[in-house]
Amino acid sequence: MNGADSLCDTLLAHGIDVCFANPGTSEMHFVAALDRKPQMRCVLGMFEGVVTGAADGYARMADKPAATLLHLGPGLANGLANIHNARRARTPMVNIVGDHATYHLQHDAPLTSDIEGLAWPMSHWVRTTRTPDAVSHDTAEAIRVAMTPPGNIATLILPADAAWGEAAQTIVSSDRRPAAPQVDEAAIREAAAAIRSGKRTVLMLSGTALRAGALETASRISRATGVRLMAQGSNGRIERGAGRVAIERVPYVVDQALEALSGTEQMILVGAKEPVAFFAYPGKPGRLEPADCRTMELASPEHDLAHALEWLADELGVGHNVTPEVEERADMPLPSGKLDADAVGRAIGALMPENAILCDESVSSGRQFFSLSRGSAPHDYLQITGGAIGLGLPMAAGAAVACPDRKVVSMQADGSGMYTVQALWTQARENLDIVTVVFANRSYAILHGELKNVGAGAPGRNAQRMLDLDHPALDWVSLARGMGVEAERATTSEELVKALQAAMSRKGPYLIEAVI
Amino acid sequence: MNGADSLCDTLLAHGIDVCFANPGTSEMHFVAALDRKPQMRCVLGMFEGVVTGAADGYARMADKPAATLLHLGPGLANGLANIHNARRARTPMVNIVGDHATYHLQHDAPLTSDIEGLAWPMSHWVRTTRTPDAVSHDTAEAIRVAMTPPGNIATLILPADAAWGEAAQTIVSSDRRPAAPQVDEAAIREAAAAIRSGKRTVLMLSGTALRAGALETASRISRATGVRLMAQGSNGRIERGAGRVAIERVPYVVDQALEALSGTEQMILVGAKEPVAFFAYPGKPGRLEPADCRTMELASPEHDLAHALEWLADELGVGHNVTPEVEERADMPLPSGKLDADAVGRAIGALMPENAILCDESVSSGRQFFSLSRGSAPHDYLQITGGAIGLGLPMAAGAAVACPDRKVVSMQADGSGMYTVQALWTQARENLDIVTVVFANRSYAILHGELKNVGAGAPGRNAQRMLDLDHPALDWVSLARGMGVEAERATTSEELVKALQAAMSRKGPYLIEAVI
C-alpha cells in the first residue's frame, strides 16, 4: 500500500467515511486510493468553500468529523472562511491538503505557497507528514485532535511523495473517542454558592449545553433557583422547538444586548465565552455584561457540559420533582398578503416538519425568526458562527449528508448565498433533501444599517454601488436551475406558503426565491 | 478628516482611482469616505475572489494597481487564491483589509483572526496601520511597494479605529513611479559572450520582456545570432498576434517540455525563472532544461527588461538593419461540423477583433489555442499564472474596467469558471464589454489525464464522482442569465461561429456555452 492508501484506511478505521473534496493533480494518488475504498463516500464541491462548509454542517449533525480534501495552498485558502466558522462552532474537522512532493518545493513551481502558514490562523493543529510511513500515525493524531472535545480543526498536509511512496502496512486505529473531562468540584461549589446568594444571575450556555437534555437540566436549575438562562449569540447547534426548553440568545445589536443583560449581577459561563460585541462601535462598550457583573466559569467548552449542569443541580439540591419548562407546540398562523422578511420567517416557522434541521444564514432578514420559532416543530438550529458569510448553502448540504432521513430547511440571505452558490450543484448531485428559502432583499441590508450607525447619512453613489445587489437583480430561480436544482419564485405570502407546503412534502433539493 | 478619508485621498494622490470591493461592518467608515470621493470608481464583487482577480486583470492592463477592499480575515482568505495568481504574475496590488478596532481584538469576537498571518504567505509586504495619523504614510508605503518593479502585493490592514479616528491633514502624495533598475554591464557581457560562443542557446523571457517592443528586440537578436526565443510557461501578459513577434511557451506537460528544451546548451533568463515542472511526477525531473545546460541570468524580473535586451543587441552588434520577425495576419478558416475544444479555439482565433484582450483560463481545452492564434488580430494574452483556478472571469472583468474601449474575450473552462462564477454579475453590473466562451466539457478534464498519469487505471465511482461535473450538467446559459448576462448555447461549430460573430459585433457582456 502507498501513503494515500494508508491515509484512507486510517480515516475509515476511525469511522470517518465521508470526504468532502475538490482534488487536484497533487492529490491524484489520494483520489486513486479513495477509488479503491467504496465504503468512503466522496462528495464533490465545485469550490473549496463548499467543501469546508459542508464538512462543518456534517460534523455538527453527525457529531463526528468528515474529512476534507483540498488542493495545495490556494485550495486551502478558498476553504478558510468556512474553516473559520467551523473553528468558532468548535466543529471537529480533518482537513487533508495536498502539497507538491517534498523534493519539488525547492523549485518554487507556480502553485507553491506556504501551506502551513495559511493553515495556522484557522486551525488548532497543523502538521506536514514527511514520509509514507508517517502517514497513518499523523492521520490518527489529526483525528484524535479533531475529536478531542469540544472539537478542533486539524489540518494535515500531505506531500505528493508521501502519498505515492510505499507505506508501512500498519494502520493506527481507534474506536475510542477522546472523552470530555469533567469539571472541578471547586467550580461547581463556586457556581452553587453564587446562585444561592440570590443575586441576579445569568447562566450563559453554549456548545453541548444547548442539546435538549442539558437544556432540561439548566431549565430545572432555573425554575428552582430563579437564575436566568441565555445562550451565546452564535452557537454551533441548538436543539429546540416544541417539547424542548427554549432559550434566548445574546442579541447581535449592541444596544439590544446591553439591554438584555442589564441588571445582571453574576454570570456563570457553561461552555460559553463572556459575551462581547460582534464589532466595535465608537463610544460603545466591547463587553456586554454590566461593568460590575461578576463572571465565573462553571465549565469551559471542552468539559462534559451536560454532566456539569447535572452536578450543579445536585449541588443545589434541585430534585427531579422540579420539571423543566418546555415549549408547547405553538399554533402559528400562516402569513398572508405582502411578503416581507417577517412573513417568510413565520411561514417557515409554521411549516417546517418534525425533526427538521434549520440552517440559518438569513443574516438581517431572519433576526425575528429565532424568537418566533420557539414553538415550531422540534428541530436542530444551525447558524453561522464566525461571521464569515457563505456558510449557509454548504452547511445545509453537509447536514443533509449526515442526516438523510431529515428535512433540511435552509434560510439564506441573498448576498451571503452568492458567496458559495456552487453548493446548490452539490445539493443536486447528491439529491439532498433540502428546501432553500432565499431572502431576496437585493442588498447587503445589514451594511445599510451599519453605514447609518457610523453616521454617514444617506448613501451616495459609491456606497450604493457597494451595498446594493440590484442592477441587475439576481434571478435565483435561474441560478438554481443552472445547477440542477428545481426552483420557483414567491412574491406574496400566499405564493410562499403554497411553495413551501409543496416543497416540504417532496424529497430532494428545492429552492424558493422569496422576493422581499 | 478621519483615517478613512486620509486613505482615500492618499490612493487618489497616487493615481489609484479604482477600488474593487466587498466591504463589511468594520469597513463602513472607509465606505463612507469612498462615498465622499466620486472620482474613485468602486466596483463590487459578490465574492472576494472576484475582487482580487479583477484587481489582477485591471493592473495587468492598466500597468498600475487597483485597490481592493476586503472584510477582515475571512474576506482576505476568500481573495487569497487570486492574490496568489497575481503574486505569480508580479501584478502590483494594494489590498486594504479592514479589522476590528485595535482595542476590540482582546475580546476575540467571532470574526477575529490573525489577518497578518493570513496575508503573509501571499503578500510581499504586510502592515497593520495603528493610528489615524499613520494611515497616509502607511498607504503611500503600500503603494510604493506595490508599484516597485516588477510589481508586488502590498496588504495594508486598517483597524476600524484607525479609520474612524481624526487624522492629520497631511496627505503623502507622489507622481513618481519607482523606476526599474538597469542590469549590470557584467551580465550583458556574460550573456553576449555566451551567445557568441555559438552554442545552442535559449533566451527565456517573461514579464515586460513579452511586450511588443521588447519582443522585437529579442527577435532581432535571434535573427542575427541564432538564439532561440522562448517564454515561461505562465506569464502575466503577452502582446502578440499579427504584426508582432510570436513566441512559444514552455509546455505544461513535462514530457513535451523536456522535448522542447532538449539539446539546449545555454539558457539566458530575461525576467524569467528557470523552467520547472508544474507538478512533480514519480521518476520525472523537476528542472526542465538538460542537466548539462548552463543557465545564466541576464536580467531578473525587477529590471528594465526592454533596456536590457536593447543593450544586449548593441553589445552583440545587432544593427537596426536586422528587422524583427513579425507575424502576418493569418487566413484562419472557420471551423465547421462537430464542436470540440480545437474548433472553439480556431473560431476564437479567427474572429477576435483587433486589439482584443484575451483572458485564457481554458486549462486543458485551450492548450492548442496559443499556437494557432499567433497570426490572429493583434491582442494581449492574459493567462492564469499561479495555477489557482477561478481567475478567468474576474480577470476579464478587471481588464475590461482598465480598457473600456477594447473587447475582452474570455476563454473559460467550466470547472474553473464555477470557482468565481459570481464575476458574471460584476460584468453585468458594470456593463463590461466581455465575450465569455465556456468550454463545457463537464469534467475536470485535466485531472482525468493526471489520474491516468499516476497509473490508477480506469476511474471507478469515487474518482468519477470527484472528477466529473455531470449529473447534473451545468446550464451556463441559465447561470449567466441568473446574474444578468445574456447568453446562448452552441452545440455545433456553425452555431458557435454565428454566436461569436454576433457577440463580437455588439457591446456589453455576453456568454456562449460551447458544449464540447
Image (cartoon, coloured by chain):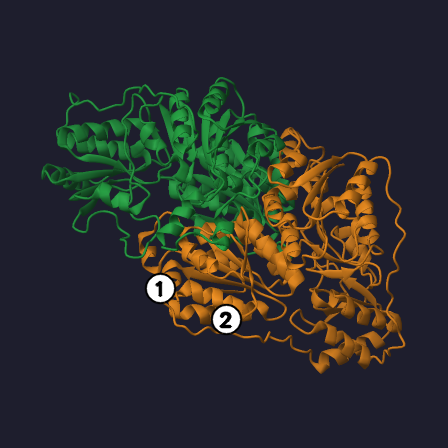
Chain colours: A green, B orange
Q: Is residue A432 above or below residue B62?
A: above
Q: Which residue is mark 1?
A: B165
Label 1: state its secondary structure.
Answer: loop
Q: Where in the figure is residue A39, as x and y percent of width and height?
A: 56, 27
Quadrant of image for the N terminus of chain A: top right
Q: Quick one: B264 or A360, which is closer to the camera?
A: A360
Badge 1 amino acid = Gly
B105 left or right of B452?
A: left
Mark 2 crowd level (few <14, some 14–19, many ≥20, 10 Å Cα): some
B111 left or right of A194?
A: right
Q: Quick one: B310 or B449, which is closer to the camera?
A: B310
Q: Chain of mark 1?
A: B
Q: Where in the figure is residue A232, as x and y percent of width and height?
A: 30, 40
Q: Where in the figure is residue A373, as x and y percent of width and height?
A: 34, 27
Q: Residue at x 79, y 49 (%)?
A: B369
Label disc, if present, on residue B186 of the rendered structure: none
Q: Is residue A262 above or below residue A512?
A: below
Dots 1 and 2: beta carbons under 8 Å? no
Q: Quick one: B431 or B185, which is closer to the camera?
A: B431
Badge 2 amino acid = Glu
Residue farthest left in this picture = A197
